[in-house]
Structures are given as structure tokens and as C-alpha cells.
Image: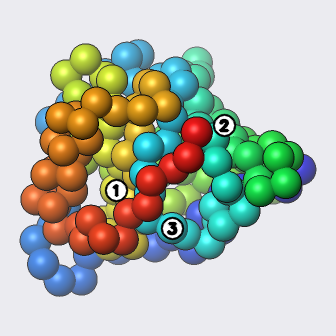
Amino acid sequence: MKSVFMTLVLLLFTNYAGGEPMQTVYHVDLQRYVGLWYEIAKIPNSFQKKCASGTTAEYTLLENGKVQVVNRCRESDGREDSAKGVARVVDTKTNAKLQVSFVRFLGKNWFWGDYWIIGLDEDYQWAIVGHPKRKYGWILARTPELAPEDLQTCHNILREQGYNLAEFIATEH
């Protein structure tokens, strides 16, 4: 199976080298966080370069405490691409710092990339996912569109976290 997000192996685990350290949300209830999320916007990256529209992420809590991740998108020719991975919580105090792997070999996951939840609606209707080096970023929502005031809130959080909003592009659904 082709992988949309195979290049997550390029994610580095070191902190942002300059500026203020990125802050995660205070706490994430994983039971409420799991489910289907639509990508609203992202910083373009190599592992999603074939995605033309309809990008989603579906999270399922596993019995071992990890989270199954299934990312899907439509390519420009209309074909669906998908990638299946797993996320593990690395900060159990907040559940806001996770690492994700889409590379499984010899029964083990390899090449974990940081997945930090840096913004989260109190009703879990939108989320902002970042990376400590600010090379990657996503705005996610439970619906394919966000209300303008919610999108503005997300933009404000991204600015406060040191992101350049000009790097983000909207996702077509």
C-alpha cells in the first residue's frame, strides 16, 4: 500500500532551535479526541505532496493505550491514498505530546515523529497539531469547514506559538 505519510520518518525529535519553546494544551482526554478529523489547513510537506483534497485522520484508541491512526486523502486523479500508523503518548501528565509512526517492520514500529496538540476546542470540535521545530502544522476539525471565528482562534493560537501563518494552505474538501 502506498503511504501518504511515509516520510514522517524525517521528523526530528529535538526541540525548536530558537524562539520560545512550543506549549501544548493542558490536558487531552483521548476518549474524546479519537474519531474522525478533517484537515482544514496544513504546512505543505513532502509526505502529503500527492494529496489534492479530502484529507482526513481517523484515530482509534487501542487496548494497549496506543492510538491507531489512519490518514486518507484524494489524489489529483481521484484515487484515494491512505496510510495506517500508530501513536503513543509520551507525556502521560497531559496526553498532549504524542509520537506517531507509519513504518512497521519485523513486528515493530520505527521512526517516530512528534505530534503535539497545541490547541484544542473545549468541545473537541477543532484541534491544532504542531511539531516542536514548527516545520509541520495542521488545523483539524470534526467537520470539513470551520466557522470563521473558530478559524480565527486557531490562527491566533498558531501565531502565539511562533508559527508563520503564511506557510499554511487550506485543504479542499
Mark 1 crowd level (few <14, some 14–19, many ≥20, 10 Å Cα): many
Q: Which residue is mark 3?
A: 44
Does residue 59 appear anywhere in the picture? no
**Residue plotted at (44% across, 25% down):** 142
Query: Horizontal placement of 152 versus 34: left or right?
Result: left
Q: Earlier in the sequence, mark 2 or mark 1?
A: 2
Give whichever of 129, 42 is nearer the camera: 42
Q: Secondary structure at mark 3?
A: loop
Q: Position of residue 132 (x, y in %)?
A: 30, 65
Gap between marks 3 and 1 measured at Cα? 13 Å
- The amino acid beneath tag 3 is Pro
Query: Horizontal placement of 16 versus 139: left or right?
Result: left
Q: Secondary structure at mark 2?
A: strand
Q: Is residue 97 above or below residue 50?
A: above
Of discs 3 and 1, which sits in the foreground?
Answer: 3
Query: Horizontal placement of 160 versus 96: left or right?
Result: left
- The amino acid beneath tag 2 is Val
Q: Position of residue 71 (x, y in %)?
A: 65, 42
- The amino acid beneath tag 1 is Gly
Q: Which residue is mark 2?
A: 70
Mark 3 crowd level (few <14, some 14–19, many ≥20, 10 Å Cα): some
Give whichever of 67, 125 is nearer the camera: 125
Query: Horizontal placement of 146 versus 6: left or right?
Result: left
Protein image colouring: rainbow
**Residue plotted at (18% across, 44% down):** 152
Gap between marks 2 and 1 measured at Cα? 18 Å
Q: Which residue is mark 1?
A: 130
